[in-house]
Amino acid sequence: MLTRKLIFNMFCVGISVTAAGANADSGSDAQQSLTIGLGAQNAPVYSGSDKRRTQVLPLVQARDGAFFFDSLKGIGYDLQSADGLYIEQSLGYGLGRSERDSDWRDGSDKLKGMGNIDATVNTSIAAGWMATPWLSLEGRATLPLSDGQGVQYRTSVTLIPLQNNNDNISLQVSALFGDRRYMNTFYGVNNGQSERSGYRRYQAAGGFYGMDSTLIWGHQFSPNWGTALSVGYSWLGDHAANSPIVFQRNQTTVAAAVTYSF
């Protein structure tokens, strides 16, 4: 699912890289860091919606060696070899989706009768390769642990054409996949949902369902203060876009954040 959370997760690239450069410039230990901030995002209220909402979220990133805490990704660890290969595992929380307009999670009154998608604890497992300082390749799987909502997969390429102590620009392009259960949780309409909502019945096939791209500019004003600006574009393939609850297959997201690094 292309949610409002995804583009904020990409701030991990914009904020972390810029903050790391600032820490190196100031002589602090880059293996231990703490960044707090406030971000605002304007995005569709759920994947496929034609309605938008602006949301403000706190941002917290803390790291101690291989272990990290991120207010959006969760808690986890990552390990990287000398040749650029890395693995990451995190434990996080998905907010699900509401059948009503919501200020704190995805949802819309247009989904009335579809029922709520429960919030769930999930784990995300990623493996990637930093081929060069400006190019990385990654595959990631997100699996729900507390509810059977299916598995989402994404493969991504990240380019960082500009990276120094004050600025970085990054572009990530991802292909999105979901198993059959995942697709029908977020895009399907079963018999009961069809009767309650009035939407036609729809069974979504598993597999490729969309593309997601995000461009981020991170700037560090001082060793402590920084900003991140991003623009995202997502496109839903036929497996998702043919759903009667998808009103717009091409969607954009704009986000900004102000951060303070210790």
Image (cartoon, rainbow, N blue to C red):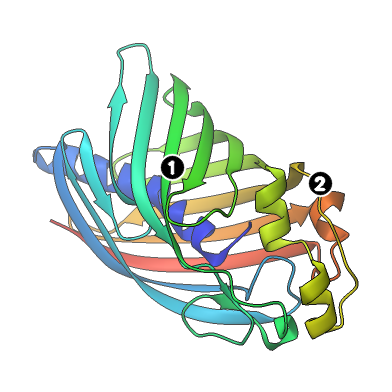
Q: Is residue 150 above or below residue 106?
A: above
Residue 179 shows in the view: yes
Q: What x and y, as percent, mark residue 251?
A: 72, 64
Most extreme residue toward the left is: 28
Q: Which residue in the rendered view is the most extreme toward the top?
A: 83
Tell me if 238 is positioned left or right of 54 in this view.
right
Quadrant of res 52: bottom right
Q: Visible in this render: residue 73?
A: no
Amino acid type, residue under disc 2 in the picture? Ala
Q: Position of residue 226 (x, y in %)?
A: 30, 60
Per the rendering, the mark at residue 205 is 2
User: Is 79 on the left or on the right of 198, as rendered?
Assistant: left
Quarter in which the N terminus is drawn: bottom right
Image point (23%, 63%), residue name:
36
* Farthest residue, direction front: 192
Mark 2–mark 1 distance (CA, rounded to whole Å): 22 Å
Secondary structure under tag 2 reads: loop
- Determine which quarter of the picture holds residue 117: bottom right
Residue 172 % position (x, y): 57, 42
The amino acid pointed to by label 1 is Ser
Pointer 1: what residue? 124
- Give the percent coordinates (x, y) of residue 96: 53, 67
The answer to which of marks 2 and 1 sits earlier in the sequence is: 1
Say what secondary structure mark 1 lies in.
Answer: strand
Give the residue at x 46% y 60%. Answer: 8
Residue at (81% x, 46% y) in the render: 205
Q: Nearer the viewer, residue 47 or 225?
A: 47
Q: Are marks 2 and 1 in contact (CB under 8 Å)?
A: no
Residue 146 lies in what quarter of the image?
bottom left
Quadrant placement of the C terminus: bottom left
